[in-house]
Amino acid sequence: MAVPGILMRLSEGISSTTLPLPGIEALYTLRAGDKEKPQNNTVYFLKDISHLLSAKDQYDADSAVNNDVSWIICSFINGRDITTPNDGAPQEDPHKLPISAAPESVLVVNGSTPRPDNEADYHAWYDQEHGAKLTQVPGWTAARRYGLVKSYGPSETASYYGLNFYEEENGLGGPEWKAGVTDWTLRIRSNAAKPNIRRVWKVMANQ
């Protein structure tokens, strides 16, 4: 059975070629909106990530040319879209965004690692409260959740990733965004195995 998911290719340098991967549904070239490294990220939306679990030779060939490159491979959990009627629950389909994220729009990637004994509470928080609150932020367009399956390279990883897409003009940092920090949110943070990995990216190109 196919396992839909993403490959995040992180590197300080900009890749000039598309990785020859089967089943690419969409591809986003991103540039960091902060000063942290790495500064570049290419996100591949894939119909099936299974072949990447034994793709070290392919990663090695990439890293031989780009010695700072990392591959982070994740399986799709669920998502939300502004175009889909939302009864408060995330959808398990589709994986690909129904409307492509436009150049100059924003992608916020949050990597979370709950303690094993608190994973159920983490998933309940995200699906029942946090994900829905983010949809209220002006400019929000879509969200996707993923679980880490495999990684190659030096970049730090998290157990789970939340990807939220916003228009270029948005309410990040505003009152709706701040309202997402609730007592439940603070409990989730206190029960994490390690701090979140949060990066803000600008979409440079899509295909």
Image: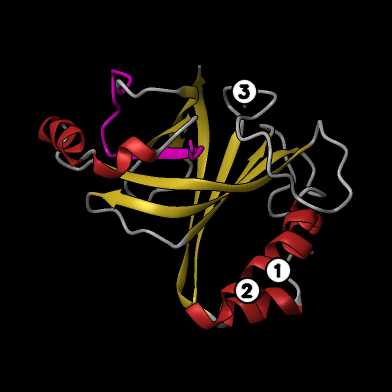
Specify start and end residues of the magenta stretch as a single range. 1-19
**Is 179 drawn above or below residue 136 in the view shown?**
below
Q: Amino acid at mark 3?
A: Ala
Residue at x-position 50% and y-position 40%: 201
**Is 165 drawn above or below residue 96 in the view shown?**
below
Mark 3 element type: loop
**Is 202 drawn above or below residue 205 in the view shown?**
below
Q: Which residue is mark 3?
A: 102
**Nearer-N-terminus badge (1/3):** 3
* Nearest the eye: 189 or 73: 73
Q: Position of residue 142 (x, y in %)?
A: 70, 38
* Real-space Cα separation, disc 3 to disc 2, in angstroms: 34 Å
Q: Which residue is mark 1?
A: 124
Q: Residues within 10 Å of mark 1 (few under 14, many from 20)?
A: few
Asked whether the viewer can see residue 36, the reply is yes
On screen, residue 60 versus residue 97, left or right, reads: left
Residue at x-position 73% and y-position 77%: 184
Q: Position of residue 21 (x, y in %)?
A: 34, 24
Residue at x-position 23% and y-position 38%: 55
**Picture quadrant where residue 69 is located:** top left
Mark 1 element type: helix
